Image (spheres, rainbow, N blue to C red):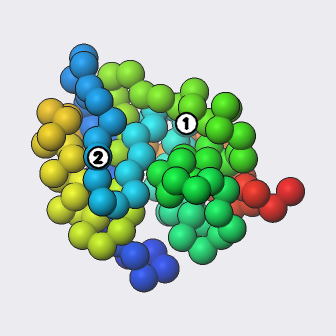
Amino acid sequence: MRSGTVAGKGYAFGLVSLPEKWAFPKSRLTVQLIAPEYVFGERHLLVSIYSHLKGLRLAKDPSIDLLLRIMGTTQIKGAVKAKPKCKAVLVVVGGGARAEYAKIARGLGAPDAGDVPSRKGEMDAAERSALAGLS
């Protein structure tokens, strides 16, 4: 799990293994679970989080807005394909994100599966995240 501060808000993200049956967690913070194949690395997530916090709103629901940023689109229909199956990138944004991340992972029964790997195309994905909603 990685955590820190972007634009004055806390964040935490990491790769988790999901149990066979899981439900999307409820939280007072912005939370998103994304299939790992749609996340290109830590820089991609950091740009998405920053754009989510500082950009124009793409959706009323902050969690959907974050998903759209990570996916680099304004279309919810296209973004929902990022629903995870057995592994997921868990992203939490807001005050106390690190503690909330741990609480959510524990509640899901989702043990840590390592760091979010970087892969080819990360800068393109980060650019799409930053530009989502501007075209």
User: Residue 135's x, y, as percent?
Assistant: 86, 57
What residue is shown with label 1?
38
What residue is shown with label 2?
26
For label 1, the SS is helix
Q: Nearer the viewer, residue 13 or 65?
A: 65
Residue farthest along the front direction in this orientation: 60
At a point 49% along the width and 79% down the height, the residue shown is: 7
Q: Residues within 10 Å of mark 1 (few under 14, many from 20)?
A: some
Disc tally is 2
Up-down: is 87 above or below 39?
Answer: above
Up-down: is 12 above or below 118?
Answer: below
Q: Tell me whether circle 1 and circle 2 mark residues in contact (CB < 8 Å).
A: no
At a point 65% along the width and 63% down the height, the residue shown is: 57
User: Residue 72's x, y, as percent?
Assistant: 68, 48
At a point 61% along the width and 66% down the height, the residue shown is: 51
Residue farthest along the top direction in this orientation: 20
Taking 113 as reference, is 13 left or right?
right
Mark 1 to mark 2 CA distance (whole Å):
22 Å
